Amino acid sequence: MANYNKKSIADLDVAGKRVIVRVDFNVPLDKTTGEITDDKRIRGALPTIQYLVDHKAKVILVSHLGRPKNGPEAKFSMKPAVDRLSELLGQEVVLASDVIGEDAKAKAEALEDGQVLMLENVRFHKEETKNDPEFARELASLAELYVNDAFGTAHRAHASTAGLANYLPSACGFLIKKEIDVMGKALNDPARPFVAILGGAKVSDKIGVINNLIDKVDTLIIGGGMAYTFNAARGQTVGNSLLEEDKIELAKELMAKAEEKGVDLLLPEDNVIADHFAADADHKVVEGNIPEGWMGMDIGPKTVELYANALKDAKTVVWNGPMGVFEFENFAKGTAQIAEAIANSDAISIIGGGDSSAAIEQLGYADKVTHISTGGGASLEFLEGKVLPGIDCLQNKDAHRAYVCGNWKMNKGVPADAEKFVTELLAKVKDVDSEILIAVPYTVLDRLVALTDATNITVAAENCHFEDEGAYTGEISPKFLAKMGIHNVVLGHSERREYFGETDELVNKKVLAALNWGVRPIICVGESLEQREAGQTFDLVKQQVEAALADVPADRLGAHVTIAYEPIWAIGTGKTATAEQAEEVCAHIRQVLANLYCEETAENTRILYGGSMKAANAAELLGQKNIDGGLIGGASLKADDFSEIAKVYQDR
Ligand code: PGA
């Protein structure tokens, strides 16, 4: 399950700070004059920009525009967007002539409180779409805080849409906040009845959405070209209508699934059909079968009535995709009447996708619906229940959100085994609202990163070196990890301290090196049985924490650093610390952090417990005030146990 409870700019202290804001100023330009033909996206970002100006931030905006392929090109300059923004904002907006070059750096440096700078088109660098960590780090170095407000690109893991969050404390802007508040609530906790209307040409484009929504809605309405594949699946003839022959079986399965879940699945009862595909084609209405030589172009009047009826009592409506060929007037009625029915309903109404949004706007219903999503691809992926990297990367509002990290140690390092296991695990934790990490052997990192893309499992490394590269046979650097898309690492595990002689100083070097590459360390500390019996626990843990964090700036703590308390005598021994023992030391660690930094930093830093944690004892341990999650070894190798622990935590 994706987590939408993210910090927003209202949760940040922005006064006097340089804030880099990813906006979506990818506006349409007139091909001949180069003028902006629709400034909706710029206006959409105004609340965030205005807020930052009013709160005395130094604002640095970054966006892409169009698809530049070969570096800087005048026709893709942000200049028109800057001019328009300046008009709308009623103040000067400075344009840098580059993105991370000298001009951008000098202008960012010279910003006064409340001033606004826009960087040049971020896609002038090909590193942007590759989410290159070096580029992201350079971009991040212009600022102290990162705000993402570009919902339209939130489904992309690019340097400016996600990578920046690895280097800076982060939050969402007001535009993304509205998207996730409204759509997130509809998906996770909808007012009922919940009706979804899906249209558009192809079943194949909407399989993900149908699959996700079928578990959540009370009624699912299908229209548009894809309806004919469903009608064919229930035995009707469809003439020359759009038909995905190879999706008929799938349509049958989805119909069976709806039946099994008690979801009302509504399909067109009648259709407006035409003898060929043209605006002025001969047309008529038929019920049921579509005769040979004719094609369905729109839903018919009976169907409109059926659908409008289903919408009448709805409390939540999600609409994505037109009901017919609405760009032709003769075949636009179905879409228009459904739009009207939605506009007239009292339901929370959410319009996603370019075509349905355009229809609602053209028909003048824009202010009669609750929310028109500003993302095409992004809102579709959102409705599919996918984890959007541009949102997922941002800091959680709840600093103590459930956090479980599996530590596989030297197990499951054979790719086929690891993949099989993670596939099983993914199915078990699909609906779990905890942050789930798995630290795995190097040999499977690459494959598991691919396998867990857009899911709620994040892959981490079990260790890394402190240099970027060099003569260190057998070692892996944080730079390599970052380049692989790995942004979490376990450091200073007691097994490394014991078998490989890692000292506090070494752990500190690794922590700094990891942070330098936007790789978040989970720093392990803990005492041996001997040390515990000698009464050294508190002093030792204090010393380990202090040493590991030497030279680590405060803003990295809440955002990027996690501490794991792992009493060595409890690791792999089956001997768990009692909840009191664990809590006592975790509370002590929080106090050490408060002394080192401040109360707030300590409060916002997550502290895990590790050592023989299993499904049976997780609830008690994780019920403690200062334990924010678990670092789990043995039990993380069993999908049942590990997913149970993740669930326990969610319910606390
Ligand atoms: P364990 O390991 O859960 O198997 O005791 C914990 C760890 O080493 O992190």
Image (cartoon, rainbow, N blue to C red):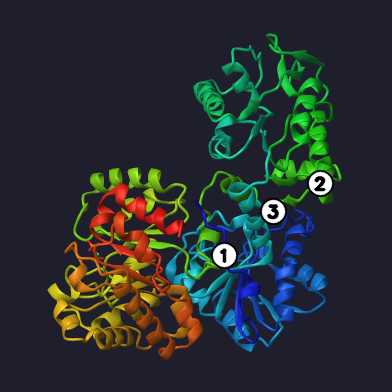
Q: Amino acid at mark 2?
A: Glu
Residue situated in front as seen by the camera: 531 or 437: 531
Residue displayed at 70% across by 13% down:
288
Q: Which residue is mark 2?
A: 361
The percent coordinates of residue 236 (x first, y second) are 63, 12
Q: Which residue is mark 1?
A: 6
- Determine the CA span between mark 2 and mark 3: 12 Å
In the rendered image, the residue lying farthest to the top is 292
Quadrant of ligand 1 in image: bottom left
> Dividing the picture into quarters, in which one does residue 283 lie?
top right
Residue displayed at 64% across by 64% down:
149
Q: Which residue is mark 3?
A: 374
For residue 384, above or below residue 238: below
Residue 482 in sight:
no
Q: Which mark is residue 300?
A: none
Residue displayed at 59% across by 56% down:
153
For residue 213, above or below residue 294: below
Q: Amino acid at mark 3?
A: Thr
The percent coordinates of residue 370 (x first, y second) are 76, 51
Q: Nearer the viewer, mark 2 or mark 1?
A: 1
Disc 2: residue Cβ within 8 A of ligand 1's nearest atom: no
Mark 1 burial class by Cα count in 10 Å: few <14, some 14-19, many 20+: many
The percent coordinates of residue 410 (x first, y second) are 19, 59
Residues under numbered marks 3 and 1 in contact, where contact means CB atoms less than 8 Å apart: no
Q: Amino acid at mark 1?
A: Lys
For numbered disc 3, what is the local secondary structure? loop
Mark 2 burial class by Cα count in 10 Å: few <14, some 14-19, many 20+: some
Residue 244 in sight:
yes
In the rendered image, the residue lying farthest to the right is 364
